[in-house]
Image: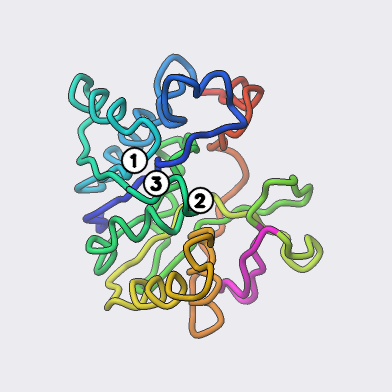
Amino acid sequence: MFVQNAVILSAGRGSRLLPLTQDRPKCLIPVGGRAILDHQIDALAAAGVARTTVVGGYLSDRITAHLAGGTAAADMRFNPFWAVSSSIGSVWTARDLLHGDFAIVNGDTVYRPALIREGLAQVEPGIALFVEPAPQPEIDDMRVAVTGGMVRAVGKTLDPADAPFRSLGIVVGRGDDGRYRRMLDAVISEPDGIQSFHHRIVHELAQAGPVQAVVLPGGGWVEIDRPEDIANWAG
């Protein structure tokens, strides 16, 4: 598979999962008997991703120890801005990896390997966002408007009637010449840019040029935001 670098954004505390995250970062919460992070690293490896880097923040030493003592292999980076920034701060921490062929993955989501493989097989040169139809939108959805197979807008406050898709939390660059990183620099440099969700980068890219919407069928993944989400993973 073409992806050389995958970056997993795992810096947040996950306060909605308390008390489960009192003594561990969100990515180490067990789902189906395994840490979220292990599911992700194994799924990326099974999809042919060459290298995975985890960006940690809250209790990052636990992630480092977990990687050192487990079977899942990945590099580790620390985001020193995790407590004062949104997810864009973790993207910034790994910005040197975000060119050519790369993937950015939300660190609180479990994916089946087949879903990632299917999505990557559809990615065309440029920047792409994995999405699925969302006929019944949920309050936490990162909504996506799509026209002609291209992303038109991304945001949590978009009208569901105009944005009937949700993001799966995977952004992919294929043969990217630095377009993604230049937009990262532009967004994070704005007043309060450090508070932006990293999907804001995709939204701004879509305003300036093509961003592919990789539309996948529903299912095969679950975002772990609350304790009840853990039971929704079918394995």
Q: Does the magenta stretch include residue 189?
A: no
Residue 143: percent from the left, percent from the top? 66, 59
Q: Distance between the residues labelled 2 and 3?
A: 10 Å
Q: How far apart are marks 1 and 2 (CA)?
A: 17 Å
Left or right: 48, with 160 as reference point: left
Pointer 1: residues within 10 angstroms few (<14), some, or many (20+)?
many
Q: Is residue 226 above or below residue 134?
A: above
Identity of the amino acid at label 2?
Gly
Query: Which range of residues does the magenta coloring cover?
Result: 143-156
Q: Find residue 100 and report its image quarter.
A: bottom left
**Coloration of the structure image:** rainbow
Nearer the camera: disc 1 or disc 2: 1
Q: Mark 3 points at which residue?
A: 9
Q: What element carries label 2?
A: strand
User: Of 127 and 84, which appears nearest the observer?
Assistant: 84
Residue 213: percent from the left, percent from the top? 53, 66
Residue at x 33%, y 48% (from the top left corner): 80
Q: Mark 2 points at which residue?
A: 169
Q: Are marks 1 and 3 in contact (CB under 8 Å)?
A: no
Q: Mark 1 points at which residue?
A: 56
Q: Is residue 23 above or below residue 172?
A: above
